Image (cartoon, rainbow, N blue to C red):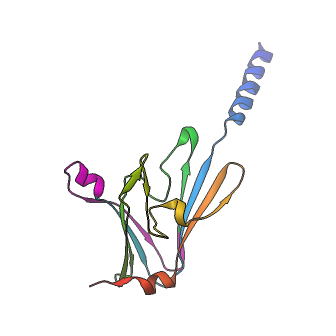
Amino acid sequence: MKYLIAGSIALAIVLLGCLKTYNDTYVVINDTSKQVRIEAYVVESAKKYNEIPYLEEVIDIQPNSKFIIRKGKGEEYQPRGIFKFEIIDSVNIIFSNQRIIRYKCNNVVDLVFICNDKRNIINYNEYYDRSCGKHECTHTYTITEADFESAEIVK
Protein backbone atom coordinates (compact mmCIF):
# COMPACT_ATOMS: atom_id res chain seq x y z
CA MET A 1 0.00 0.00 0.00
CA LYS A 2 2.86 2.34 0.88
CA TYR A 3 4.37 1.78 -2.61
CA LEU A 4 1.02 2.39 -4.29
CA ILE A 5 0.64 5.79 -2.59
CA ALA A 6 4.26 6.75 -3.34
CA GLY A 7 3.84 5.62 -6.97
CA SER A 8 0.63 7.61 -7.33
CA ILE A 9 2.29 10.72 -5.95
CA ALA A 10 5.30 10.28 -8.27
CA LEU A 11 3.01 9.78 -11.27
CA ALA A 12 1.03 12.92 -10.39
CA ILE A 13 4.25 14.95 -10.11
CA VAL A 14 5.47 13.67 -13.49
CA LEU A 15 2.14 14.41 -15.19
CA LEU A 16 1.91 17.89 -13.69
CA GLY A 17 5.49 18.55 -14.76
CA CYS A 18 4.56 17.71 -18.35
CA LEU A 19 1.85 20.36 -18.49
CA LYS A 20 3.42 23.33 -20.17
CA THR A 21 2.37 26.88 -19.53
CA TYR A 22 2.89 29.13 -22.50
CA ASN A 23 2.88 32.87 -21.93
CA ASP A 24 3.37 36.06 -23.84
CA THR A 25 4.65 39.15 -22.10
CA TYR A 26 3.67 42.55 -23.43
CA VAL A 27 5.76 45.57 -22.43
CA VAL A 28 5.08 49.23 -23.13
CA ILE A 29 8.10 51.40 -22.38
CA ASN A 30 7.55 55.08 -21.75
CA ASP A 31 10.90 56.43 -22.89
CA THR A 32 9.82 60.06 -22.38
CA SER A 33 9.98 62.59 -19.57
CA LYS A 34 6.15 62.82 -19.63
CA GLN A 35 3.43 60.92 -17.79
CA VAL A 36 1.70 58.72 -20.40
CA ARG A 37 -1.95 57.75 -20.22
CA ILE A 38 -3.28 55.15 -22.65
CA GLU A 39 -7.06 55.29 -22.99
CA ALA A 40 -8.65 52.33 -24.77
CA TYR A 41 -12.13 52.72 -26.24
CA VAL A 42 -14.78 50.54 -27.83
CA VAL A 43 -16.25 52.66 -30.61
CA GLU A 44 -16.98 50.75 -33.84
CA SER A 45 -18.22 47.59 -32.11
CA ALA A 46 -20.51 49.65 -29.89
CA LYS A 47 -21.95 51.49 -32.89
CA LYS A 48 -22.55 48.17 -34.64
CA TYR A 49 -24.87 47.14 -31.78
CA ASN A 50 -26.45 50.60 -31.43
CA GLU A 51 -24.62 51.21 -28.17
CA ILE A 52 -22.81 54.32 -27.01
CA PRO A 53 -19.01 54.14 -27.50
CA TYR A 54 -17.26 53.77 -24.14
CA LEU A 55 -13.91 53.89 -22.39
CA GLU A 56 -12.92 50.29 -21.60
CA GLU A 57 -9.47 50.55 -20.07
CA VAL A 58 -6.87 53.08 -18.86
CA ILE A 59 -3.15 52.41 -18.47
CA ASP A 60 -0.96 55.02 -16.77
CA ILE A 61 2.82 54.84 -17.20
CA GLN A 62 5.20 57.08 -15.29
CA PRO A 63 8.02 58.91 -17.13
CA ASN A 64 10.94 56.62 -18.05
CA SER A 65 9.04 53.60 -16.79
CA LYS A 66 7.17 50.62 -18.23
CA PHE A 67 3.91 48.72 -18.14
CA ILE A 68 4.11 44.92 -18.23
CA ILE A 69 1.34 42.36 -18.64
CA ARG A 70 1.69 38.58 -19.04
CA LYS A 71 -0.95 36.63 -20.91
CA GLY A 72 -1.56 32.93 -21.30
CA LYS A 73 -1.67 31.05 -24.59
CA GLY A 74 -3.11 27.67 -25.53
CA GLU A 75 -5.53 26.39 -22.88
CA GLU A 76 -4.82 29.50 -20.80
CA TYR A 77 -5.59 31.81 -23.76
CA GLN A 78 -6.05 35.52 -23.12
CA PRO A 79 -6.45 38.18 -25.83
CA ARG A 80 -3.22 39.25 -27.50
CA GLY A 81 -1.79 42.71 -26.95
CA ILE A 82 -1.65 44.99 -23.93
CA PHE A 83 -5.40 45.34 -23.45
CA LYS A 84 -7.69 43.03 -21.49
CA PHE A 85 -10.13 42.67 -24.38
CA GLU A 86 -9.71 42.32 -28.16
CA ILE A 87 -12.73 44.55 -28.72
CA ILE A 88 -10.64 47.73 -28.27
CA ASP A 89 -10.72 49.69 -31.54
CA SER A 90 -9.69 53.23 -30.61
CA VAL A 91 -6.81 54.39 -28.43
CA ASN A 92 -5.56 57.75 -27.23
CA ILE A 93 -2.01 58.12 -25.97
CA ILE A 94 -1.90 61.28 -23.87
CA PHE A 95 1.36 62.90 -22.77
CA SER A 96 0.96 64.81 -19.44
CA ASN A 97 -2.30 66.31 -20.74
CA GLN A 98 -0.22 68.31 -23.22
CA ARG A 99 -0.23 66.25 -26.42
CA ILE A 100 -2.21 63.35 -27.82
CA ILE A 101 -1.85 60.60 -30.42
CA ARG A 102 -5.11 59.00 -31.63
CA TYR A 103 -5.19 55.53 -33.12
CA LYS A 104 -8.20 53.83 -34.68
CA CYS A 105 -8.66 50.39 -36.06
CA ASN A 106 -11.95 49.51 -37.73
CA ASN A 107 -10.99 46.74 -40.15
CA VAL A 108 -11.72 43.39 -38.49
CA VAL A 109 -10.65 40.03 -39.93
CA ASP A 110 -11.43 36.87 -37.93
CA LEU A 111 -12.03 38.94 -34.77
CA VAL A 112 -8.58 40.54 -35.08
CA PHE A 113 -8.20 44.23 -35.86
CA ILE A 114 -6.03 44.98 -38.87
CA CYS A 115 -4.77 48.56 -38.65
CA ASN A 116 -3.25 50.54 -41.47
CA ASP A 117 -1.24 52.95 -39.32
CA LYS A 118 2.38 52.14 -38.62
CA ARG A 119 3.13 51.86 -34.90
CA ASN A 120 -0.58 51.61 -34.08
CA ILE A 121 -0.64 50.39 -30.48
CA ILE A 122 -3.82 48.38 -31.12
CA ASN A 123 -2.22 46.21 -33.80
CA TYR A 124 0.48 44.37 -31.88
CA ASN A 125 1.75 42.61 -35.03
CA GLU A 126 2.89 45.89 -36.59
CA TYR A 127 5.17 47.42 -34.03
CA TYR A 128 6.37 45.21 -31.24
CA ASP A 129 9.99 44.28 -30.95
CA ARG A 130 9.68 40.56 -30.41
CA SER A 131 11.99 38.12 -28.67
CA CYS A 132 10.99 34.52 -28.14
CA GLY A 133 12.21 31.69 -25.99
CA LYS A 134 11.06 28.09 -26.01
CA HIS A 135 7.64 28.67 -24.45
CA GLU A 136 7.08 32.40 -24.43
CA CYS A 137 7.57 35.61 -26.34
CA THR A 138 8.11 39.16 -25.16
CA HIS A 139 6.55 41.90 -27.28
CA THR A 140 7.79 45.42 -26.62
CA TYR A 141 6.40 48.77 -27.75
CA THR A 142 8.36 51.92 -26.96
CA ILE A 143 6.78 55.37 -26.69
CA THR A 144 9.50 57.89 -27.55
CA GLU A 145 10.20 61.60 -27.35
CA ALA A 146 9.69 61.63 -31.15
CA ASP A 147 6.13 60.36 -30.53
CA PHE A 148 5.58 63.22 -28.09
CA GLU A 149 6.95 65.78 -30.54
CA SER A 150 4.77 64.52 -33.39
CA ALA A 151 1.59 64.28 -31.26
CA GLU A 152 -1.08 66.95 -31.65
CA ILE A 153 -1.40 69.60 -28.94
CA VAL A 154 -4.31 69.07 -26.53
CA LYS A 155 -6.72 71.99 -26.68
Tell me if residue 68 can be seen: no
| Residue sitting farthest toward the top | 1
Image x and y of residue 94, in percent: 38, 76
The answer to whether 8 is drawn above or below residue 119 in the figure is: above
The answer to whether 75 is drawn above or below residue 87 in the figure is: above
Image x and y of residue 127, in percent: 54, 67
Q: Residue at x 45, y 68 (%)?
A: 120
Residue 103's quadrant in the figure? Answer: bottom left
Q: Quadrant of the N terminus?
A: top right
Tell me if residue 143 can be seen: yes
| Residue sitting farthest toward the right | 3
Residue 59: say if magenta.
yes
Q: Is residue 42 left or right of residue 151?
A: left
Q: Is residue 133 left or right of residue 149?
A: right
Q: How many marks?
A: 0
State the extent of the magenta-drawn residues as a range.
44-66
Residue 49: say if magenta.
yes
Image x and y of residue 68, in percent: 54, 63
Q: Is residue 141 left or right of residue 18?
A: left
Residue 18's quadrant in the figure? Answer: top right
Q: Nearer the viewer, residue 58 or 101?
A: 101
The answer to whether 112 is drawn above or below residue 95 in the figure is: above
Residue 84's quadrant in the figure? Answer: bottom left
Q: Nearer the viewer, residue 120 or 142?
A: 120
Q: Nearer the viewer, residue 35 or 142?
A: 142
Q: Residue at x 49, y 80 (%)?
A: 63
Image x and y of residue 110, in percent: 43, 45
Q: Residue at x 46, y 66 (%)?
A: 121
Q: Quadrant of the C terminus?
A: bottom left
Q: Residue at x 63, y 43 (%)?
A: 21
